[in-house]
Image: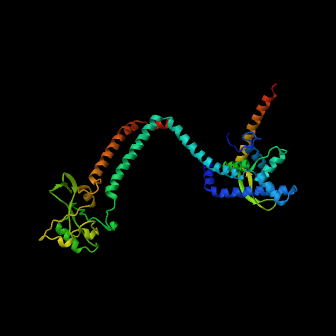
Amino acid sequence: MRLLRRLTALWRAPRAGADLDEEIEFHRAARQAQFERDGLGEDAARAASVRAMGNTTLAREDARALWIALAIESVWQDVAYGGRALARQPGFVLVAVATLASAIGLNTSLFTAFNAFMWQRWAVPHADRVVTIVNTRTQADFALEEYRYFAGHARSFSGIVAARCISGLGDGCVLKLNDADITAAFVTGNYFQVLGVAMQRGRAFGPAEDRRDDPRAVAVLSAEAWHSRFGDEPSVDPVTYLAAAIIFAGACAAATFVPARRAARVDPAVALRCD
Amino acid sequence: MALTNQPPDLLPGTLDMLILRTLARGAMHGYGIADHLRVVSDEVLQVGESSLYPALQRLLLNGWVTAEWGASDNNRRARYYTITAAGRKQLRAERAEFDRLIGAIQRVMATS
């Protein structure tokens, strides 16, 4: 109740300041009236009342400082109470804080990595309208003929593209280039056209070049690969980023293990009784 | 030297008690409180505005008084303070402590 009253006073501080100004002016006017009753003229009474009031600015500042000081006092009392309670059980506090800190750190790092790789929107126009088509029955990839059938008959999409990792050249979509791992895939000729991705340099390939009877070996480099593998500005690649995230997660897991084992040995009933 | 709102003529902590005691007689505005203290004390207690209004704010924030705007005798808008039940309880506690302190001082002063 007391805290609520103080918070309300802080909330109403601007209005309270105006009230105080009006109140002090009333006080001065009452003094002036008293001086006039004692025989002073209006001007002399006004001057005398101003002198008698003294430093009204100090009164206003003191009143305002009071509102802030009381609010700080309330917070400080809560902090001091919490501090005393924690100081009585330093071992338990250490275990609890270490466990919480490690768990929060682990959670944060895992979420950061997950968010970076799973929830980031694709860097294409209208990314919210891009969907992935999967075979939920067999989980197998679609055959090229199946893709062509979909692409030719689908009416709900403005276009359908297909991509497939380069098999036989490396592990999954990763292949070696100048002793460095890069991610690569075969894509259909309409890939950049359907996704609306423009080239920063050079040209992309189009549907006209996607022909079995006239195959052309055309490759498009990502801006990141261009920067990191071909001498432009170096930057952190996804593999490095993922490795860093895994190392960080591993360190957090190790840091969690010891405090968690200790915390598991604490009897909650005993801990509550001590508090 | 520390700055304080306490008038030099008052013992520390007595201003709140004097205001509460004055308001125990009925609702009053700030000027009325200061005037009452001055008259009743035969001009001894001259409570300055720089002490009075911060003290009233303190009493308000502690819930010992409430304030409402009303019309004064000369029909001007004035803020009237009223003591609350918590304020009366506080007044009794402060008065008991004050009596104990004054008694102790008098006993010390009465020794030869």
Q: Residue furthest top?
A: B112
| Placement of A162 over or under A180, stated as above or below | below
Q: In which quarter of the image is residue A260?
A: top left
In the depicted view, which residue is nearer to us: A18 or B58? A18
In the depicted view, which residue is nearer to us: A16 or B67? A16
Residue at 16% x, 58% y: name it: A167
Expressed as whole percent of the image width and height from the top left, the position of residue B20 reads: 75, 47
Residue at 59% x, 46% y: name it: A72
| Placement of A66 over or under A225, stated as above or below | above
Expressed as whole percent of the image width and height from the top left, the position of residue A134 reads: 25, 63
Would residue B75 be visible to someone looking at this image? yes
Expressed as whole percent of the image width and height from the top left, the position of residue B100 reads: 75, 34
Expressed as whole percent of the image width and height from the top left, the position of residue A154 reads: 25, 73
Q: Which residue lies furthest to the left in this view?
A: A213
Q: Is residue A118 left or right of residue A172?
A: right
Would residue B26 be visible to someone looking at this image? no
| Placement of A88 over or under A42, stated as above or below | above
